[in-house]
């Protein structure tokens, strides 16, 4: 008999799924497990499941909408499960990096289980570097992260080129969401949307070939421990410009430098380090560095606008993020000259 306690409603689909023999086998649980469920944060229902006797742990994600599976929930689950599986295979023989391994998924398309990993989030190293000047550790972690992203992007490169319409829509969506919290006045938002249209019209933006990207490269999704990088949460993975991942990290570094270091430009050497070591994964390191940093301002602006949506920042701070997002987009005009 499976005993379940914690943040799970009895008679719910999740309660029933935790009793599934297929899950018990995939997670290597004892015959009569005692499962304790703890609700975690996330865009969907995410649970840490701990077995009381063996102390084994795993993560269970629910893609239900009001305890009901839908086509949308099944699609989201299949997408993340597939991305984790593929990324896990790509880096399987590398000892320095691990992607959280998917264990199994439900037949109904509403749950999947993945390996539990523990470590120190990238954000902790970013904060220490900006507050206390401990840049050495952050450089080391960024080198590992650049290696993973370079490997992921290189192994999944497609022949088709990106379309700027995708990032244009996302930039505008983030700008509008940020404006609701006071990042823009109505006139400033109109100006930002015009700036986005102009930036996305530059021909060199469409130069990139599509690759599989992590899609949510924020610091909480990269953990470090025992000399390894652990990669989590590929729900938003998809085929896009590889700079989508790099630009998101660049925006996060800029934000951490501004918030914790008092000077956003403290992030510059770390952003440069990330791009240079990323480029080292490719045959022509210098050319790759030039081409990727050229497109960085577009995706870095998207990252800053994404951060500016968060309700826990002050209006003043959101406006600073929005201002720098606009400066990023304006800087793209320099690269467009002569094209």
Image (spheres, rainbow, N blue to C red):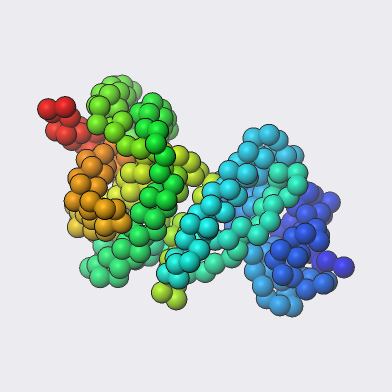
Quadrant holding the C terminus: top left
Q: Is residue 140 left or right of residue 178?
A: left
Toward the viewer: 12 or 162?
162
Residue 86 x %, y %: 53, 52
Quarter of the image that includes the N terminus? bottom right
The quarter of the picture where residue 292 lies is top left
Looking at the picture, does residue 47 appear above or below residue 3?
above
Q: Is residue 59 above or below residue 165?
A: below
User: Which residue is drawn at the image coordinates 73% and 50% (left, top)?
Assistant: 106
Does the rendering let one see residue 202? Answer: yes
- Picture residue at 41% right of the left edge, 74% below the top: 227
Q: Position of residue 293 (x, y in %)?
A: 23, 45
Residue sitting at 81 percent across and 54 percent down? 16
**Would you identify the image quadrant in which residue 122 lies?**
bottom left
Residue 36 visible somewhere in the drawing: no
- State the image quarter where residue 157 is shown: top left
Residue at the image point whose x is 45% and y is 67% from the top: 94
Expressed as whole percent of the image width and height from the top left, the position of residue 5 reads 76, 64
Closest to the observer: 8 or 61? Answer: 61
Depth check: 177 or 207 in front? 207
Residue 150 in the image: above or below residue 301: below
Which residue sits furthest left?
338
Residue at the right extreme, as displayed: 1
């Amino acid at each position: 008999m499976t005993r379940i306690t914690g943040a799970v409603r009895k008679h719910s689909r999740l309660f029933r799924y935790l009793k599934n023999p297929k899950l018990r086998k995939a997670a290597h649980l004892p015959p009569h497990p005692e499962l304790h469920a703890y609700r975690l944060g996330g865009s969907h229902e995410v649970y840490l499941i701990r077995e009381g006797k063996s102390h084994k742990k795993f993560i269970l994600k629910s893609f239900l909408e009001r305890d009901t599976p839908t086509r949308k929930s099944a699609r989201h689950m299949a997408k993340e499960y597939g991305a984790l599986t593929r990324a896990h295979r790509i880096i399987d023989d590398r000892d320095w990096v691990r992607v959280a391994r998917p264990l199994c998924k439900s037949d109904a398309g509403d749950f999947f289980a993945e390996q539990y990993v523990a470590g120190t989030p990238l954000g902790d190293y970013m904060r220490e570097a900006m507050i206390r000047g401990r840049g050495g550790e952050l450089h080391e972690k960024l080198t590992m992260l650049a290696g993973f992203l370079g490997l992921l992007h290189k192994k999944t490169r497609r022949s088709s080129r990106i379309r700027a319409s995708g990032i244009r829509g996302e930039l505008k969506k983030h700008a509008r969401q940020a404006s609701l919290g006071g990042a823009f006045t109505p006139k400033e938002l109109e100006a930002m949307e015009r700036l986005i249209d102009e930036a996305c019209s530059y021909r060199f933006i469409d130069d990139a070939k599509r690759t599989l990207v992590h899609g949510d490269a924020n610091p909480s999704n990269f953990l470090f421990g025992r000399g390894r990088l652990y990669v989590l949460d590929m729900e938003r993975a998809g085929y896009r410009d590889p700079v989508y991942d790099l630009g998101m990290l660049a925006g996060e570094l800029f934000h951490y430098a501004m918030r914790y270091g008092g000077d956003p430009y403290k992030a510059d050497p770390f952003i440069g380090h990330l791009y240079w070591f990323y480029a080292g994964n490719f045959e022509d390191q210098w050319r790759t560095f030039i081409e990727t940093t050229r497109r960085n301002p577009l995706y870095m602006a998207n990252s800053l606008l994404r951060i500016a949506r968060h309700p826990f920042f002050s209006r003043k701070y959101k406006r600073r993020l929005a201002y720098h997002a606009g400066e990023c987009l304006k800087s793209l005009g320099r690269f467009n000259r002569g094209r």
